[in-house]
Image (cartoon, helix red, strand yellow):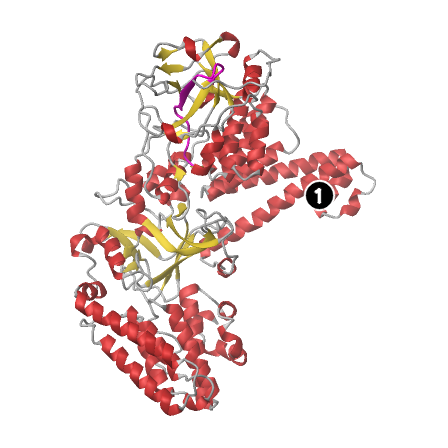
Amino acid sequence: MTKVRRKGASATDYSPRGLIEWFSRLDLEYTTGDEYDEYDDNDIDRTRASILPPLSDLKPIRLAEMDTTKKYSGRYLLCRAKGAPFLRYGLAFPAEDQDGHLFIVYARNYPLYGVKQTDLDKLFFPGTGLLIREPAFTLSTTEGMPSDVRVSSPTDMEPGYDPYAAGQAYLDAEQPYLAVQAFTEAIARAETQQDTVRVTLKRAHANLKAGRPAAAYHDTSIVLMYLDMGVPVALGDRSVALTTRLNALSAAGLHDLAELVRDDLFSLHEDEVTRLDGIDEALGKFIRSGDDSHLKGTTVEGQIAAYKMYGRIEGARRRQQHAQECKKASESGDYNLFPFEQGPSPPLKPPCDRLKLRDYVGPIRVAQLKKRTGGRGVIATRDIKPGELLLVEKAFAVADFGTLHDLSIDAQADQIPHRPKHALAAEVAARVLDDPSTLSVLESLFDGRGSPERPLVFGALSKRSIPKYASAPISLDMDWVERICRFNGFNFPPSCLPELDSPNLGAPGWRTWSALFLNGSAFNHSCLPNTYHKTVGDLLVVRARVPVKKGKEVYVSYAPIDRTPSHEIWDVLDRHFGDNGCPCAYCVETKDDDNNVLEHRQNALDQFDEAFDDFFAPRESTPEACAEQYAHMSTIVADICSTYMGDCNVKPELVEPYAKLVEVASGDRRSTDTVLHGPMAVAWSNAVAAAGGACDLSGDVCEFDPAPLCWTETIVESTFEYAQACIEEGSPAASARALHLLTILANLSRVEHGDNLEHFWRRWRTNLSEFEEFKERLVEGMAEGDK
C-alpha cells in the first residue's frame, strides 16, 4: 500500500476543518483515473438527500476501521483526492486517507450537466483535502481492486479550501461551472444571512455565465427574499440582484417577465436617487444630468457612491433602449441584421456569436396537413411576397461538432442516463436540466417514433412559466433527446475556430456546428424550397424566395443541394420520408442515375476543369483562340447535360461550369476584342436556370423570377463578371445592360438577405468597386418595396 510521504508537517488545528487544510498540504504521488475505468458499480445506499449533521456531533474514522459494507452514521472520514476524476456511473475519483490507504470516492447526485470534460480534472484535483460526512463504505471483494466510499449528496463532501475565494478565482479564469460548485460550497458554510446573500449573488452571476439562466433566476429569488426580510446588505445589492434577474430572464427567452423586472429596477433607481437627494442634493443632480460640475464641494465618499450609482443607472438605461428596439423589431419584423453578419471572424463565442435579439414570427403558422397523412407543417396566413421575413428565432441550443462534449449527466442514484452520442444532445440536456419548464416545449417536437406528445405553437417558449425557486431535479431520457436532435437539429457550414485537438490552441481550423430551433423545426423539407434560410450568429433567419399564396405550405431545405453530396442528402431525407425517399422531381431524377451515368458525368466535369485551367494559362490570346476554346468547353458542358435524363430544370452540378463559361466568354481581360458577348449572355442565362432561377434580360423587369435556389453566390459573381464586360464594351446599350444586371443583383440581395441598397453595396463592396458611377442610378431600378 502506498504511504504518504510527510515532510514533518504537523497539524496545529485539530478541528475537522483544520485537519482538512493540513492534509491538503501534504505531498502525494499522483495517480491518473484511467486505471480505474473498468471498476464496476455496486448497488448500495440509494439515499437521495442529505441532512447535514453538525461536525461537532460526528467522530472521526479511518479506512482501516471500516471493515463492513454499510453506512457509518455519526462518523466522518478525512481524506484527499489522489487522482483525476473520471466518470463511472457518475463522478468518481481515487482518494486516500491519512494512513495512505487507497479507495474510490463515488459522488452520487453530483450535478454534472453543463460541465466540460476539460473541467473534470479541476473538480477534485489531486491533493484536495476532503471531509466526508457519514460515509457509505463498500468492501471490495475483488483482489487488487480498491474498496469504495459512496457520498449521497455533494454537500456531504467538504473541501479543504476557501470556497468563496476559489469561486471568484474560477470566475476570473472564465470557468463559471467550477465557480458555481465553489460558491455552492461557500453557501453551505455561510454563517450569517449577509454572507448567504453575498455568495448567492455571486453564484447567480456564475450560473448566468455558465449558460444556466434558470439557476441564476432562482438564485436571485433567494437573494430578494432575504432583502425583503430586511437583511442588511451593501448599497446596490438589490440593484445588482434585479439586473442579474433581468439578464437571466432575457437569456431564458422570457422577455415579458424581464420587462416587469426592468420596471422594478427603474423604480428602485428612482428611490435611490431620491434618497441621495436627501443626503446631498448636488449628488442627485449629477446622477440625473451626468454633469460632474455638480460634484464640486461634495465629499470624496459621496462622489464615489454617486459615480457607482450613475454607472448602474446609465447601464440600465442603455439596456432598456436596446430592449425597446428588440421588442419593436420582434413586433414589426424590421430587423437590421447586416451589422451582425459583418462581425469578427472567428466568432466571439464559438461556434457562433450569441445575439441579444428577440424572436419574430411573420405571416405563417403551424397547421395539420391532410396531404401528409395527419402530419403538420407551416403554411402562409396571407399572400407572401419574395423577400418577406418569415422567421427570426434564437437557437434553443448550439453545439460545435469539433469540440469536447458537455457532460449532460444529472447523476441520480437510481437512474443515471448514459453520456450523449451527439454534442447537440448534450447542450439540449443541459438546457432542460437547468430549466425543466422547457421540457413541455421540447415534447412538441417529432422524435421519429410517432406523433409528438404536445402541439407545436410558435412562440410557446416565450410564453411558458418558470417557478420562482428551483424544483426537484428531473430524470431525462437521453435516447429521446438524441432522437429529437437527430430529427430536428440544423447543421451549418463550418466556422473558423481554434483547433482544440491541436497542441497550438491558437491555430485556426474549420468546425461544423449545429443548433436546435424549436420554431424552425416545424418547417417541412423540400429540395426545391420556396424560402431562403441562413444563420446570423445564433439566429435562424427565414425569408420567402418566391411568392407564396395564402394557405400554401412554406418549406425549407434540410440538406441544401448546393453544398451537400447526393448520398448525404439521401441519408438525411430517408429519416423523414422512409424507404421511398423524397418525392420531389430533383430527388427522383438523381436517385435514378446509375453508377455508369454518374461516373460519366464526373469524368466530364473533371475534363471541363482541366480545359478551364488551360484557358487561363499564360500565353497570347486572340479572338479566334477564345472562340475556339469556348466552343470546346461548350461541347464538354453539352456532354454533361446529356447525362441528365429527367425533366427537372435544377442541375446544381452545372451552375459552376456555366459560370466559368461566362468567365471564358469575357476573355483574358487583356483585350476587349476577345469578349464574346452573345455566348456570355447564353452561358449566364443557363447558369441561372441550372440554379433554379430565371431572368428575362430583354424586358423591363429588373429581378429574378424566380430567384435562384442554390449557388446564389456563384450566380452573383457571374453576374458581376457579365456586367463588367458590358461596361468595358462602352456602348450606351451595354451600359444600360450593366445597370440592368446590377439592379437584378440588388433585388436578389434584398430577397435573400433583406438588404437595402447601402447594405447591398457594402456586402459586395469588393466586386462593386468598379461600379461607383451606377450607385445613384440603381435606386431607379430597385423594386418598389425597397425604394
User: Can residue 218 be seen by looking at this rendering?
Assistant: no
Q: Give the residue furthest to the right.
A: 297
Using the image as rendered, state which of residue 241 and residue 1 is in the foreground: 1
Specify start and end residues of the magenta stretch as a single range.
Answer: 97-114
Residue 694, above or below 498: below
Q: Secondary structure at mark 1?
A: helix
Residue 113 magenta-highlighted = yes
The residue pinned by badge 1 equals 287
Q: Is residue 362 visible?
A: yes
Q: Residue at x 49, y 15 (%)?
A: 98
Q: Position of residue 273 (x, y in %)?
A: 69, 38
Quadrant location of the N terminus?
Answer: top left
- Magenta-colored stretch includes residue 22: no
Name the residue located 31 percent from the left edge and 60 percent from the top edge. 564
Residue nearest the viewer, comparing 232 with 526: 526
Q: Say what amino acid the circle numbered 1 marks.
A: Ile
Q: Quadrant of residue 419?
A: top left
Which residue is at a point 64% across and 24% down the rendered structure image?
232
Mark count: 1
Percent coordinates x, y for residue 547 in the rendering: 33, 67
